[in-house]
Amino acid sequence: MSGRRLRDWAFWGLCGLAMLGSAAPAVSVLVSVVHQAAPVLDWSLLTRRSNAGGIENAVLGTLWLLLGVLVLAGSIGIGAGVYLAELATGRVARVLRFGSEVLAGMPSIVIGYIGYVTMVVGLHWGYSYLAGVIALSVLVLPYIVKTTEVALRQVPSALREGAVGLGMAHRQVIWRILLPPAAPAVVSGVVVALAISTGELAPLLFTVGFTDSNPSLAPLHQQVPYLTSVTFTDLSLPGARAHATAAAAGAASLAILVLLILLGRALSRRSRLATAQMTL
Amino acid sequence: MTTLTQGRPAAGQASGPRRRAALRLLERADPVPVLLALAAVLPTVALLVLAAVMLTEAYPAIVFNGWSFLTGRTFTMGNLYGTATQVRHGFAAPAGARYGVLPFLVGTLLSSLLALAVALPVGVGAAVLLAERLPARVQAPLGVVLELLAGIPSVIFGLWGVYTFGPLLSRTVDPWVAAAGLPWLSGPVGSGQGLLTASLVLAVMVVPIIASITRELVRSVPALTKQGALALGLTGSESVRVVTMPFIRNGILAAGVLGLARALGETIAVLIISGNALNTYPHSIFAPFATMASTIAAILDGALTDSTGMALHSLAEVGLVLLGITLVTNLGGRLLAQRFAATGLPVGRGV
């Protein structure tokens, strides 16, 4: 008996170590980034541009890129998810779903390379906002498609059957019955896609370039600054101050990320509550 | 569109069966489903376009390099400043250029497999503890930590690996390992940039993927079976071994394969931490190395200056090999998951 008890303790002890090994890096990353950024961390960071050791232009550029991804990947992804969940049938649905899942496995540097060859050079867009938004959108599109589809499928089928039984048209069923309760989950999927976009560098490295001025609204031929690029370039510059700025830019992208994750969690909790109440 | 404009006034005027027919016409001509279908086709179209572009970009290099691409041990862009070129099979490259992918291929596979070997037991152990043992009020915050870990940008992992984790390893763990004098596990430990640090950082990036999938899998095990095991007097760990694990084993396999795919494609963190050694195999676990993804990011700038374009084409071929490996791995994971796992798998960067 005691041997079995001992083995049990040993097993859960190892699991505890594994838990520690998973959680500790997250804490360590946060602490070390903030610690490294500490020498330069004050509010003036947000009002100086990157040529003056600040990150104002990079923050603005990142938010500007996120807005583009929200519009482009958000609209296409949600549309595709609705279509796959409600309208597509049989083989067509299977093929399209398969295509989207395969796209999800595309290495981000390959997307960056292709963006460079096709848009920056091929279409003569130069390093530009639109090229970056499209590259990022290709990266996160499969994620939005999948979460939208799953969200719609989780609406209880009794609701759907009830609506059809009352004689509602198919599109009325989609717009009035299925989408409202699924909306928080759909939006939380989009929010997570934005979180992914915030942290990506490889697709942007060769598509949007970088500039020390604030981002312009021009979609083509104008380079856009963004946070992960500041981290990446300042990291390999000599000097403690550059390293601190790299960490500060990292801390800023982490802050955006945490906000987005919390927003996504709040939304998905709302959607769980909404779905739980929706029984007939 | 014409049917739409014809259908609209009819819908307003007529009544009865004519009105119903008009409504049906309106519904069929509704632009919304067409737009939705267009959106749904886009990811697949994007995939095909990406694959086609990659193939056409790599084609000159495939012809020029032949099999030596896969067996070659050096990747050098040759003399980019001279005008001398070498021509093979009708395609020109700068004199002295040789394009061999083998060291990058070895680096990619080695670092990803090492990462998986660490991440799999850690991720599964953490997930089992989280789902089976911990009370709900601890589960939620730990879930947030895992989610955060999945979301941390790879460039920040790079920063952490270079300035915090790598130096820590080279001061503490590395000397101990090196002192044991085992083959391939010894040698100069350096400043902590190299295969071991990069693999462990990759493992940290893969853990949340494996843990989150495993957690859902553990939750999908029927409670009745678990309670039965406990009622028979099994301890918690025995119940995990006898009931939970057989139930979710294949799902865990799928999770591992998906995690592997993530590690294979990782670019920026590896680029920063690997030490970025071109044309050499890692002679010890502490040695610098390079992967296919990190190499593309590292030398794309230089490749752009090659007037023959062959350097760029060869990088496309590197990308094509990487693409092939990650897509096959990813698909394998998904097929496994579809066949065996009870829950759907997440798509994307593992968040």
Image: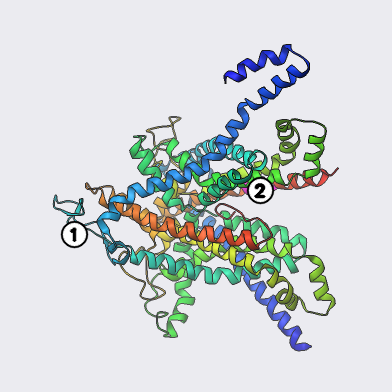
For label 1, count other residues whose C-alpha is less than 10 Å away and answer few (under 14), some (14-19) or many (20+). some
Residue B23: percent from the left, percent from the top? 71, 22
Query: As shown in the figure, which amino acid type bears the numbered disc 2?
Result: Leu
**A265 in the magenta segment:** yes
Up/down of B251 relative to A180, above or below? below
Residue A262, numbered label:
2
Residue B345 found in image quarter = bottom right
Up/down of B186 relative to A43, above or below? below
> Is label 1 on the same chain as label 2?
no
What is the C-alpha distance between the residues marked 1 and 2?
A: 54 Å
Extreme-top residue of the structure: B13
Reading the image, the residue beneath label 1 is B96
Query: Is A82 or A203 nearer to us in this picture?
Result: A82
Secondary structure beneath label 1: loop
Give the left or right position of residue A131, taking residue A189 as reference. left
Point 58% across, 47% down: residue: A97
Point 47% across, 63% down: residue: B161
For label 2, count other residues whose C-alpha is less than 10 Å away and answer few (under 14), some (14-19) or many (20+). some
Residue A144, numbered label:
none
Point 47% across, 46% down: residue: B47
Residue A140: percent from the left, percent from the top? 54, 46
**A72 in the magenta segment:** no
The range drawn in magenta is: A260-267
